[in-house]
Amino acid sequence: MQLAKSRIQCDLDFDRDGRQAGFLRAPNSTNSSGWGTVQIPIYVLKNGAGPTLLLTGGVHGDEYEGQIAIHKLSQSLKAEEICGRLIMIPAVNLPAATQHNGVRLSPIDGRDLNRCFPGNPAGTFCEMLAHFLDTNILPHVDVCVDMHTGGHSAEFAPCSVMHSIENPDLRRKTLAAAAAFGAPFNVIFSGVDEGATFTAAIERRQILCLGTEIGGWGRVSVEALRIGERGLRNLLCHLGMLGGTPQTIQKNGASGTRHMMVPDPSCYSFATGAGIFEPCNSAGELVQKDQPAGYLHFVEELDREPLEIRYQAPGLLWAAAGPGRVLRGDCVAVVMQDYEETPA
């Protein structure tokens, strides 16, 4: 397979059977290391014919459950147990994951890797890494799971996520994969700025792509990690790469995943100023249009009354604000509603 020229090196043979562990070596010249590299762990398990599944975590460094779930799978799963090929990168944006105690943006160039696709081989660290993933990893891939959480930005009702896909066959297959993953919710949405995300790059290649939003608030959630670990093995079973049947019974006794959607911008609520945000609800709670989403407090100003921020749409609260201190324009709540498929 002819792959694009990249400044990042990887010496793994993606066509070789067995287990391989190595590094993506991205050049990073610094004041103290002129020929330095960032070495990002990557694992490849291959056993005969079958689909290729890519698992990625740590695209944002402060989102931990995916990093742990994929790392644990890379250590426990044996190549001879699967049919096909499994590529695992537990912490894609390694500098953001390991420096400064976990941050969303890369400390090397200050960029959000998930807003840099399709990337640039001659660009900054994140642009270079995005280009490598798009041109040297994705051509091998049939299905991808890109694991995210709310990081320090928000707490999510644990879910798989996907975009609204125009191709009806790919949409059907993605919905089926989400049901097999078995999170409490699967959310079909269009975000504030989706065109330069990893998911958008994957979908441009007509690859089946599933994301997650499990947990948040910059911590490791026991329940979200359980959902993520189970979901990865469920998907391997669904794809025929691993024996067994997906286990989708929810902790509350529900039989499977509830498909939801974020249909339009009215589902998003934003801070109208800089202050401390007091939320009124937790992720997963039922809310109504015009109900208070929370109050913005100005503790540094004498006798200033708090500002009320209201929901603009009814539904279940999908994402609840993470940080107490917010700035004007920060997203403080996202509401989801039951999924209704738009006729083709």
Image (spheres, rainbow, N blue to C red):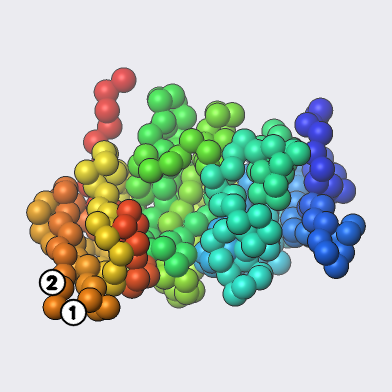
Neighbours of disc 1 within 10 Å: few (<14), some (14-19), many (20+): few
Q: Dot 2 corresponds to which residue?
A: 305
Tell me what residue is drawn at x 19 percent, y 68 percent.
295
- SS label for mark 2: loop
Describe residue 280's horizontal placement relative to residue 97 as left or right.
Answer: left
Is residue 42 among the parts visible in the rendering? yes
Confirm or deny contact between disc 1 and disc 2 (CB under 8 A).
Answer: no
Real-space Cα distance between discs 1 and 2? 9 Å
Quadrant of the image containing the N terminus: top right
Amino acid type of the residue tagged 2 in the rendering: Glu
> Element at badge 1?
loop
Give how far across and how far down residue 260 sits, in percent: 29, 46
Residue at (68, 59) in percent of width and height: 108
Residue 302 numbered tag: 1
Of all residues, the one furthest to the top in this rendering is 344
Q: Quadrant of residue 173?
A: top left
Residue closer to the observer: 139 or 152? 152
